[in-house]
Amino acid sequence: MIVQGHEITQTLTRKAHTVIVGSGSGGAVVAHRLATAGVEVVVLEEGGYFTKKDFTQREDQMFPALYRAGAQQMSDDGLINVLQGSCFGGSTVINTADCVPIPPEVFEHWKGLVGITELDVRTVDDSVKRVFDMLRVNRIPRDRVNANNAIMLDAGPKFGMKSGTFDNNRVDCVGSGYCLIGCAYDAKKGANLTYLPAAIAAGATVYTDCRVDRIERLGSGRLVVHGDVVERGPRVARHPVRIEAERVVLSAGTIHSPAILHRSGFDKGLAQLGRNLSLQPQMPVIAEFGDDRKIEMWRGIPQAAWCNEVDNTAEHGLGGYAVEGINGQVANSAAALPGFGLEHKALMGRLGHVAVALVLVPDRPSGEVAWEWRGSRGFAPKIHYRMRPEWVARMKRGLSRAAEIFFDAGAKRVSFSNEIFTPLTGPDQLRRIEGFPIRTGVARFVSAHPQGTCRMGLDARTSVVDQDHRLHTIPNLYVVDASVMPTTSSTHTMIPTMTLADRAAHRMLGSQAGS
Amino acid sequence: MPDTIPIGALAVHLPETTRRVFLSRSLRVVGALATLPLVAPACSKAPTAPVPTDLHVFTAGEYEILSAVADTLVPRGGAFPLGASDVGLAERIDRFLATQDPAVVKGLRGALVILEYGGGPLAGRIGRFSRMDGDARTAVFRALPHRFGIARQIYAGLKQLCLFLFYCTDESWPALGYDGPWIGREVPAR
């Protein structure tokens, strides 16, 4: 059953065996596994419930409706726009549907870094298979790659880079290009169309427009989830929520799961809570082609192809950089392109001949999150993150390579999401990228893969949750989302999060059966 | 609390401490500017559209500044005739912000005040931003990304807000060759 916030007219008070906070790639998978095993499950989702008829393909309507903070969540220095879905299905509704599991070197790295012994490619293999089956993951065929992404695909062999098309969870995609603002054709098989309906069919109840603020631990050890039914849009509190449970699973995402723990007073004894944040910063690269070259990047699969120079090792985990095609839709693109006034209009007038790629750099966990409590409006997160020289150097290598690829493909000019770096007009200028200015209000990065604020590990000194996702200090409180990743897990985080969630749910059921 | 300038899919924060420092500096600038009409030549005032009577979040004064910003960032002419004033961009921004977090509106208001009184001096210009002609306003916006942090953030926030919402309008799309949403239309054959 789905109960939307506007259907709730008084204080919501009830009991359940398991309350799951958040319905994205972590919470949805756990809800499905537990509900199908007969566990009484309640899911609380802060965002709204939307179906394909609600996805209007209009950016000014959909970004505010589907994204955390209306897609305006920023690092505290204003340099990085941290994007997260906030609706029924979470980020799986608004992502680019790329399905990339955790590479084996990352598991090895986690073993060395935080001593995780129970996670490796072999132990998660069944989970990966189950997730792939549920999402109907398939490889994007070459003939579905649009002109924008084809540039990346063709560049791989030419530049001695690995390249290919992504595995994705689209089925019968019509190629409208609006993946980032919800699929109006139900082609993208996000949690909203897979795990959540299955969980509901198995008896789970999902309350949307319900924000969780804190968790109380009773003397009996049972937990009470406190929050509010909020008004859709401004998300102002309307009615209190109080649900008592045997078990609580926090799947509110990397920024908000630790916020709830902090406000609940559960940060005591957990020095790593809110720390070890990775953002995987990404920078748009914009290439202008001649009038004879039609790109129309806004149509087709937005992110279908990649080429990369990854450098994954057990020593440092994910490394190198990736260059991936992207479609930002027209208004989003307008905001990201450099300049203003007549020059900007000239570029926009030629947008049909513009290609865009994203350079993604896997970073090291280094940021941290703090929160301000705003009463009826909930948390205001403060995301503290600074780019470090090592990954700035990799970013510049990636930008240079992306520009080189575009020039080789016939681009006349290449620019970046940067207000003072003048466009490159040929490959002879690539060296200028060494001086690429990274300053607030000048350069604009995006992050779609925040991870790591409730790191998994062996003890409370070095981590927040154990290998079963249980808080080190409270055995019936779990965290199951991207926040548990000890370091950045993959270049796309939906599958890694779902994989760990599937494994976590099975461990919960095993533990329940054994208790 | 950090204030945020909304910019559609991207946003810029005005850190509170920085904002306070800048506001205090700006107030000194404002104080100095108050004497300018006595000694400086009058700046030509650009024509402005009438202020709507049913504004949601802005005062009439703030709306005038915002209109000047919008006209500067998306002027008429150039690659295509349509400009901010043709689509009522400032009014659209006012409506859009009515449903946003109040902290966002607060940040934007602060940015407009700073730009109005502090923008000119940052670009070596005299007078209030909304009273400048188009060339002077353009010079202010060209200067902002090269100045200190808060000036750069104001530039980025206002620019991205205006451009995002301008290119959300159906009227802007033909000039781009973008045929708009497919909703309500038959999906083209692949």
Image: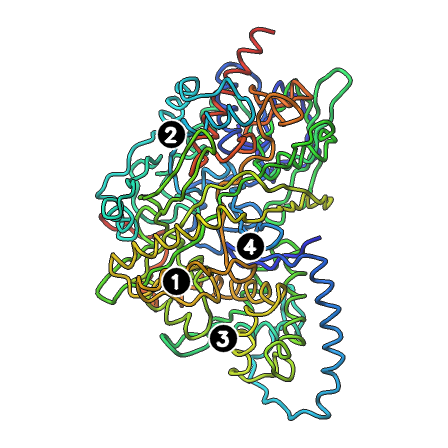
Residue A252: image location, x then y, percent: 58, 34
Q: Secondary structure at mark 3?
A: helix
- Which numbered disc, 2 or 1, marks the residue closer to the eye? 1
A132 to A34, vertically: above or below: below
At mark 4, the secondary structure is loop
Amino acid type at image mark 3: Ser
- Which percent across, then down, holds residue A347? 37, 68
Residues beneath discs 4 and 2 located on the same chain = yes
- Which chain contains the residue that carries disc 4? A
> What whole-number distance in Å separates the C-alpha atoms at marks 1 and 3?
28 Å
At a point 73% along the width and 92% down the height, the residue shown is: B38
Q: Is residue A39 visible?
A: yes
Measure the C-alpha gap from mark 3 to mark 2.
46 Å
Q: Which mark is residue B85?
A: 3
Looking at the rendered structure, whether the residues under marks 2 and 1 are on a common chain is answered as: yes
Label whose residue precedes the other's in the sequence (4 or 2): 4
Instruction: Report the residue marked by disc 1.
Output: A415
The verdict on a common chain for dots 4 and 3 is: no
Residue that numbered label 4 is attached to: A79
Specify the amino acid type for callout 2: Leu
Vertical order, A513 against A414 (above or below): above
Q: Are marks 4 and 2 in contact (CB under 8 Å)?
A: no
- Gap between marks 4 and 1 measured at Cα: 18 Å
